[in-house]
Amino acid sequence: MKDFVIITDSTSDLTLEMRQQFNIEYVPMQYIIDGVEFKASLDWESHSVKEYYDLMRNGLRIYTTQILKDTYLEAFQNAIDAGKDVVYIGCSSALSASIKVALLVAMEMKEQNPDAGIYCIDSLISSLGQGYLAMEASRKRAEGLSAADTAAYIESIKLCVNQCGTVGSLEYLRRAGRVKASKAFFGNLFGVKPLIISDRKGQNFAYKKAKGTANARIGIAEHIVEAANGVYEELFLTHADCAEEMELVKEEILKRAPFKKVTVNTIGPIVGASVGPGTVIAFCLGTEVTIEGNE
């Protein structure tokens, strides 16, 4: 049985420590500021977290790009040349076209390398939900599963990764086309915070409103605790330069459920460009997501 590499991308929001601990690689996207492209580094090589989100707070729009075909070719070929298979866990196809490029590259490479095992998974989520799936793949690899069996396992659990969060302003998501909600939902958001989940299609779906920030925290906590369904193993929390608010969300969740392990980090530049500063998101493994959002 061949060893395999686990690859994800800039939307996974995995820190360097996480990537090293679980031996996970990532292929970068790009973000564009005033016509200049920057690598969407998960280690914030071009801009600091504060610099990046302050640019958005000051009204600058940051654009993002999908992953180039050549980037996938290089990453997959490096693994094949090393005699390894590939498990790639990409951003939700509802949020990025990158997974489609990855699948095309994998198909082309398999024609030239029939024995190559390249498994590309549409995670149907992003940020630490996607990152969690990559970490789970690493755990299965450590247990001795093959690339094929690991990919099958990740496919079987991906809709059990539950997300719930809120944003400082829904305008970033709406402008980027990264949120689904009814027209009535958008009609009256004064003093109201949207609660946003990842639905069965992998869309960010604004499914409920909360009156004010404090109620939004409660709403996030209640959703995550219900989704966990009595199994409180790992809780993942991430934020867009609003650590204090994230701590308050964490407190609300832990009041209700004694999660054994809590991981908190920062939303990376690609997800951040769509959700904007002030965003907080919680993730856990739990019951399968059944909601399918429609406008």
Image: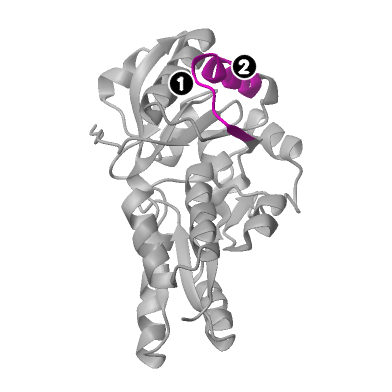
Q: Amino acid at mark 1?
A: Ile
- Residue receiving disc 1: 220
Count up the numbered dots.
2
Q: Residues within 10 Å of mark 2 (few under 14, many from 20)?
A: some
Above/below status of 22 relative to 146: above
- Residue drawn at x 42%, y 64% as measured from the top left: 150
| Residue 13 position within the rendered picture, expressed as x and y whole percent measured from the top left | 59, 47
Which residue is located at x 55 percent, y 15 percent? 252
Residue 60 colored in magenta in the image: no
- Is the C terminus in the top left, top right, bottom left or bottom right quadrant? top left
**Of the residues under marks 2 and 1, which one precedes in the sequence?**
1
**Residue ID for mark 2:** 248
Q: Disc 2 on helix, strand or loop?
A: helix
- Closest to the observer, 92 or 187: 92
Q: Which residues are magenta?
A: 245-263
Q: Which residue is more in the foreground, 154 or 195?
A: 154
Camera-side residue of 22 and 242 = 22
The reply to whether residue 128 is visible in this rendering is yes
Amino acid type, residue under disc 2 in the picture: Leu
Q: Residue at x 66, y 25 (%)?
A: 242
